[in-house]
Image: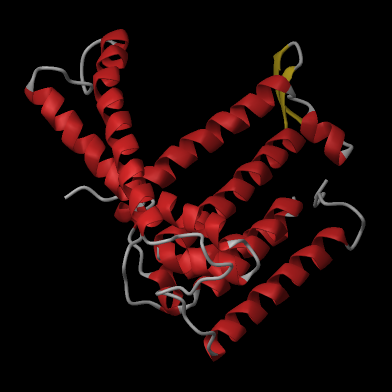
Amino acid sequence: MAVEMLGYIEKTSPIHRLTGTTKLIGFLLFTTATMFTYDTRVLLVMGLVSIVLFRLSRIQFREVRFVLIFTALFVLINALAVYLFEPEQGVAIYGSRHVLLEGIGRFTVTAEQLFYLFNLILKYSVIVPIAVLFLVTTHPTEFASSLNRIGVPYKIAFAVSLALRYIPDVQADFRTIANAQEARGIAVSHGSLWQRARNSIQILLPLLFTSLERIETVSNAMDLRGFGAGRKRTWYNQQTMTRIDYVAISCIVLLTIFSFVVTFHDGNRFYNPF
């Protein structure tokens, strides 16, 4: 059975028992703290916290393998692009230049540039697993209720909930259409690149029409039930905050404060070991 990509994975874990509001606040604070810092010490601590949270969630690597591998390739390509466009960026940031390998023209390998790229990769490696963890441990309806609780209009929150809820359905439709097309001799898993791209259209067009039909069905059902008539609404999956939620929020707030204090104590976001 194929594992759904970025769909809700039901488990019994401390992370799953937290309310959607707690996980949303924690995700926003964690992401903000990580994005603002280039301090290697802070990023390593945040990375350790990320690993601990993944272990607590009981999510298996194979269940999110595709997303993590795809993201890892993107991060490596991004780091390579940064080096190709600005191979001396690390030198400009850290104010020193230790050449490790002479290259062609301006493409030399310096310790400063490698350290900068290491921090860049580490930053993405910390943020992405937390984002994936948030998506796979938060039920779409609970996520919508948490958005509404922090002030997002319930119509927007419900639209986000529908988008997340139907990701697994769109994936299932894609596999069904792909299998049907392969039974007719139209495959996208082999052949030349041009042939595979052309055959992909035979899958994407039916998938598009299927998705549009689902949108029309859902919108008609919502209209028949009077969705949007009231200024407020209740949520079936909304949970009440418990002591563990307040403890979790307190911990992430302290972690965020630690990140900002360590990062900006000398007025510079970059930790300079040189």
Left or right, 118 with respect to 37, comes to left
Left or right, 222 with respect to 147, comes to left
At 70% from the left edge and 74% from the top edge, which residue is drawn?
A: 253
Judged from this view, the residue extending furthest toward the right is 267
Question: Is 166 or 42 nearer to us in this picture?
Answer: 166
Colour setup of the view: secondary structure
Left or right, 191 with respect to 67, comes to left
At 29% from the left edge and 50% from the top edge, which residue is drawn?
A: 4
- x, y percentage for residue 226? 43, 61
Any part of residue 98 in sight: no
Question: Is 209 or 225 nearer to us in this picture?
Answer: 225
The answer to whether 258 is drawn above or below residue 17 in the figure is above
Left or right, 122 with respect to 97, comes to left
Instruction: Residue 208: name its quadrant.
Output: top left
At 48% from the left edge and 58% from the top edge, which residue is drawn?
A: 158
Any part of residue 47 in sight: yes
Instruction: Residue 182: name its quadrant.
Output: top left
- x, y percentage for residue 186? 15, 17
Judged from this view, the residue extending furthest toward the bottom is 243
Question: Is 39 or 178 nearer to us in this picture?
Answer: 178
- x, y percentage for residue 236? 40, 74
- x, y percentage for residue 52? 49, 69
The answer to whether 203 is drawn above or below residue 211 in the figure is above
